[in-house]
Image (cartoon, grey):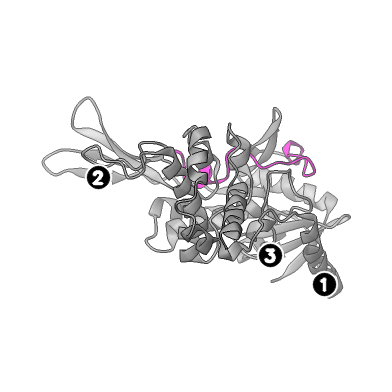
Amino acid sequence: MPYKILDKQNYQVFVANLAAAEPVIAPVPKESRFALSRITNPAQLADPEAYIPTLLPHKKHLFPAKENLLKFKLEDQPRLTPQMEAPQQVFLEVRPCDINGIRQLDMFFLDDISDEHYARRRQATSIIGLDCNEHCDGHCFCESVGGLLVDKGYDLFFSDQGKYYMVSIGTQKGALLLDKYATPQEASEELITAYKQLQTQKLSRFPIRFKGDLYSVPLLLTGSYDSPLWAELEKIDLACGACNVTCPTCSCFDVLDKLELDLVSGSRRRNWDGCMLQGFAEVAGGGNFRPERAQRVRHRIYRKFKYQMQKYGEPFCVGCGRCIRSCLVGINPYEILNRLFEEAGKGA
C-alpha cells in the first residue's frame, strides 16, 4: 500500500481545492452535535478533537431513506421507467467506524445479487478517511469489534502525525485526487515504520468493552436464546427504531407501489424499515413472526453478532456508539453481550 506525506497547510489547500471542484460531504458542527453536510471550504469542518459521530451515518447518501426505484404507466402495454440517481460525491474525513460501515453496506448490497441503485451511487462516491487517535466518547467501542484500524474500504486515508498527515492511498482514484488537488511528498520507509508502530500502540488507548472473546459471540448467542435478559429489556424498550435509523450497517427496507389519482400512473418506492418496529415482521393474514419487543431486541443483537458474523466472518456492528447515544432508555449492545457472558460463566 503506497504512502505519501502532506503537511498541515497543504491539507487545508487540498480540502479547499477539492471542495471547489467536487461535491464534498463532511462532518460539520450543528448545535451541540455534528452532521454530514456539503462543504465549500475547510473552515466548515468539525474540530477533529471534539468530533463525535454524526447522528445519521453516510448510508443516507448511498441508500436514501426514501427512494424512487421506477415509474410505471398501466396502459395496454405497461411501461416501466427506472429511476436512477447517482450524483458524484466525495465523503471527506470519514472515521474508521464509518469506513467499515460503508464497507459492510457494500457486502450486503453488492456481494450476492448486486443492487443497481446502490451500486451506481457507490461507484460515484469517493471515500477520504481520517484516523481517530483517541476514542470519541464513552459510548464508542470500535476497537472492541476490530474496527479501529482500517486497511481497505477507502480511496485515501489521512492520519494526523503531529506536524503532518500520513496519507495511505487505497485506490488509483484516490491517488489521482491527491495529485490533482494537493502537492504530496514521498513517505520514507523510516516514517512509514514509525507510523505503523504508532498505529499499534494507540490500541491501548481504546478500552475493550467485552468481557469475552469477540469471535465466541455467535456461540454465546446460540446458547442464550432463552436468556431472561430479553424479557428484562422488553420492559424498557420503546420499539422506536432509533437504533435502526442511526446504525451504519442496518440495511432493511420496504418497497411500496404508489398509484396516482389517475389510476394509471404511479411509482415504486423504497423506504427504510427496521427490525425493531412492530410491523416489520408482519405478513399477509395478520401474522407476525416477532410480535413481542423482547423478540425484536434479541433479533437485532443476533443479526449484528451472529447471523451476519457467521456469513461474513465479522460482526455487523462497527462500534460507533450511535445506537447507544440515540436510545432514550440506554440499551447498549456491549452491555447486553457482557451480561450474556456473565450468565454463561455462571452456567459453566
Mark 2 element type: strand
Give the residue furthest to the right: 163
The reply, left or right, for residue 50 in relation to residue 93 is right
Give the residue furthest to the top: 261
Amino acid at dot 2: Leu
Residue picked out by circle 1: 193
Q: Position of residue 104 (x, y in %)?
A: 52, 57
Toward the viewer: 51 or 162?
A: 51
Amino acid at dot 3: Ile
User: What residue is shown at x 36% (from left), y 43% (from top)?
Assistant: 290
- Residue 339 in sight from this viewpoint: yes
User: What residue is shown at x 77% (from left), y 60% (from top)?
Assistant: 203
Q: Which quadrant holds the N terminus?
A: bottom right
State which region is magenta.
Answer: 42-65
The reply, left or right, for residue 255 in relation to residue 236 is left
User: What residue is shown at x 44% (from left), y 60% (from top)?
Assistant: 110
Residue 340: within the magenta?
no
Give the residue furthest to the bottom: 189
Residue picked out by circle 2: 80
